[in-house]
Amino acid sequence: MSTQQAVRHVEGEVRELIRRTGLDPSRDTREVQRLVQDAVHDYDERSLHGGLPQLGDTKAAVHSILAVVAGYGPLQQYFDDPAVEEIWINEPSKVFVARGGVAELTPTILTSEEVRDLVERMLKTSGRRVDLSSPFVDATLPDGSRLHVVIPDISRLHWQVNVRKFVVKADHLDDLVRLGSVTKQAADFLAAAVSSGLNILVAGGTQAGKTTLLNCLAAAIPPRERVITCEEVFELKIPLRDVASMQCRQPSLEGTGEVPLRRLVKEALRMRPSRIIVGEVRQEESLDLLIALNSGVPGMCTLHANSAREAVTKMCTLPLLAGDNVSSRFVVPTVASSVDLVVHVALERDGRRRVREIVAVPGRAEGDVIEVADLFVSRGGMLQRADGFPPHREAFDRAGYDVTALLAQRGA
């Protein structure tokens, strides 16, 4: 029996012990870890006296067995690697990861059965499912990572699995300054805008860092305010005392019980919010968010867009999905009066995430075109102050900020 066989032998013993004790590897992590350590130590002792092959590195054996019985098997090494931001499976023999925003093909090769087993293990704690009647699933893993799965016949042949890890690189705007994502002047201005209660859209492409930026902006909310968050799946980690978080729910097997994002936004207004934060707007829930912002409740959200101006345009078109009775004659002036700032963030070629522009929405519209004013723009790869000024200077004054002085500053 080789070292690898010895590890598998101990793994079998551990599985039997877990079955006998009734432990849940996904919940009773400490107990399972202690059980694995004891099993490895016991086998190591027996191998010294009973002629059994030795395990070699016992720490490596413990880690390997834990990955199989309580982790995500061959993928666990990528979950444990802090440099890995995302993991995805195109087919069992093609497992990719992204490090620093750059994709790479890994040497990991799985079987179709292993992929299905891993997905089932990931979904176990979420209460969500994936099957022929529900071929897509979004779920949050216990460590905060986001899971997305698509199965055939929506996908061609294989299960498509994507895990976006919750890699904490920034909790506050100062962290983004340290990482080079935004200048000190722009960060100070954004912190003042959030504290003053301005409504902010965070726009960008996939993996641009929108959620991270939204988290950092939310950290600037005054601590006495009550924040209600609405998301498809839980991703936001807001470091405030009074935060109520809600996520959507998939329909049951009978097709009932679904709770869409639009419903969450409506319910949030009944929960005494000081702020409403929507993780991402994609469709008609944008109308309910606009109505909330227009009713005097400050808020923030993210959306996919290639620039700040395109984000404003998109906010004018998404609400039209809510029904034929919603027209651009209502939506355009509502966006103009409800949205105050748009921050556009992008993933650069070198893998870094940077704020490319910050624009203000003064509140004026001509026809279907909303006026915007550049506050910060990218010049020569650097975010620099432009000529525009934000709306609601009185809000800055009430919060104790001199917006003219903030925007007159120079330097990073």
Image (spheres, helix red, strand yellow):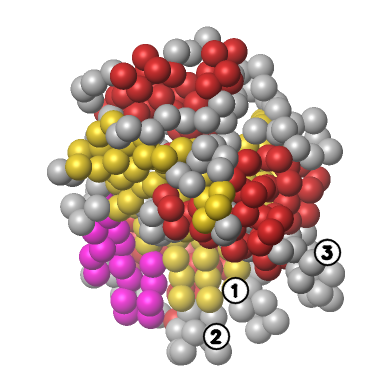
The residue under label 2 is which amino acid type? Ile
Determine whether, in the image, residue 278 is placed left or right of residue 68.
Answer: right
Secondary structure of the residue carrying tag 3 is loop
Q: CA distance from mark 2 to mark 1?
A: 9 Å
Instruction: Please report contact status of discs 2 and 3: CB closer than 8 Å, yes or no.
Output: no
The residue under label 1 is which amino acid type? Phe
The quadrant of the rendering that contains the N terminus is bottom left
Q: Is residue 18 magenta?
A: no
Which mark sits nearer the N-terminus, 2 or 1?
1
Mark number displayed over residue 257: 3
Q: How many tags in the picture?
A: 3
Secondary structure of the residue carrying tag 1 is strand
Residue at x-position 49% and y-position 84%: 155
| Residue under label 1 | 136
Q: CA distance from mark 3 to mark 1?
A: 17 Å
Q: Position of residue 341 (x, y in %)?
A: 49, 38
Specify the segment rendered in magenta: 88-105
